[in-house]
Image: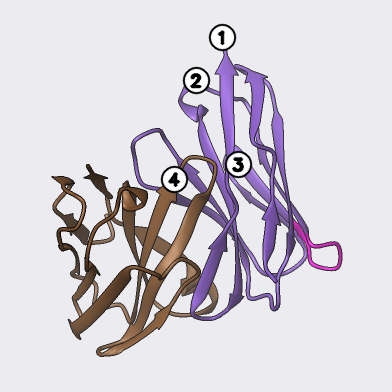
Amino acid sequence: DAGITQSPRHKVTETGTPVTLRCHQTENHRYMYWYRQDPGHGLRLIHYSYGVKDTDKGEVSDGYSVSRSKTEDFLLTLESATSSQTSVYFCAIKAGTGRDNEQFFGPGTRLTVL
Amino acid sequence: GQNIDQPTEMTATEGAIVQINCTYQTSGFNGLFWYQQHAGEAPTFLSYNVLDGLEEKGRFSSFLSRSKGYSYLLLKELQMKDSASYLCAVSPRDDKIIFGKGTRLHILP
């Protein structure tokens, strides 16, 4: 195991409520990522981080924000959840470049917005 | 833009060989990955290619042609547990990996 956990693993919430998902790693890796996975779309990058307090947007960042105040934690926040954000969310970590360029994935969070 | 194409679904028979193709067009190239994902689980790393040619790892092999923007994953001696989705992914630069939509592989007994 790559030492990456996500919490919660399952969440049901209502439209308009804020939601925060947590990704925690024990590997001290520099890069952390948030993806969502939906049928017919595959894995799509939401936001990623390349260091503490250093983040950047992915291809589907609207409606999401992130924070990374410590190397080990990367938070994804849905400011006001919508039904279109019902999805499975995966966090991933990456050590570096070259042969260390592979990503390791957390177990995922299944989010349902009613 | 960035684009990765792979077949949506494939079916093969237990004990046989199957080849899953992937074509890509990206703004840069820093390596190509294959991941396996069983239903309801997270993707797991299978292989990495950065130079042209074939990389073999047990029953799985991955091939890359950078000039053609093409890769394939070859699975030999198929087993029922190989039923899964296979994700082709390209790193256009050091800090990003872009995923294709995945190929769902069904294995028949």
Tell me what residue is drawn at x 67 percent, y 69 percent. Answer: B50
Q: Where is residue A51 in the image (x, y as percent from the top left)?
A: 31, 87
Residue type of the residue flagged with mark 1: Pro
Chain ID, mark 4: A
Cα separation, mark 1 vs mark 4, equals: 29 Å
Q: Which colour scheme is used?
A: by chain
Residue beneath label 3, please? B60
Q: Residues within 10 Å of mark 3 (few under 14, many from 20)?
A: some
User: Camera-side residue: A50 or A34?
Assistant: A34
Residue type of the residue flagged with mark 3: Phe
Residue A109's place in the image compared with A21, above or below, is above
Q: Are marks 3 and 1 in contact (CB under 8 Å)?
A: no
The residue tagged with tag 1: helix, strand or loop? Answer: loop
Residue beneath label 4, please? A38
Residue type of the residue flagged with mark 2: Met
Q: What stretch is highlighted in magenta?
A: B64-69
Q: Which image quarter holds the N terminus of chain A?
A: bottom left
Badge 2 and badge 1 both on one subunit: yes
Residue type of the residue flagged with mark 4: Asp
Query: Which chain comes out purple in the rendered image?
Result: B
The residue tagged with tag 4: helix, strand or loop? Answer: strand
Cα separation, mark 2 vs mark 4, equals: 25 Å
The residue tagged with tag 2: helix, strand or loop? Answer: helix
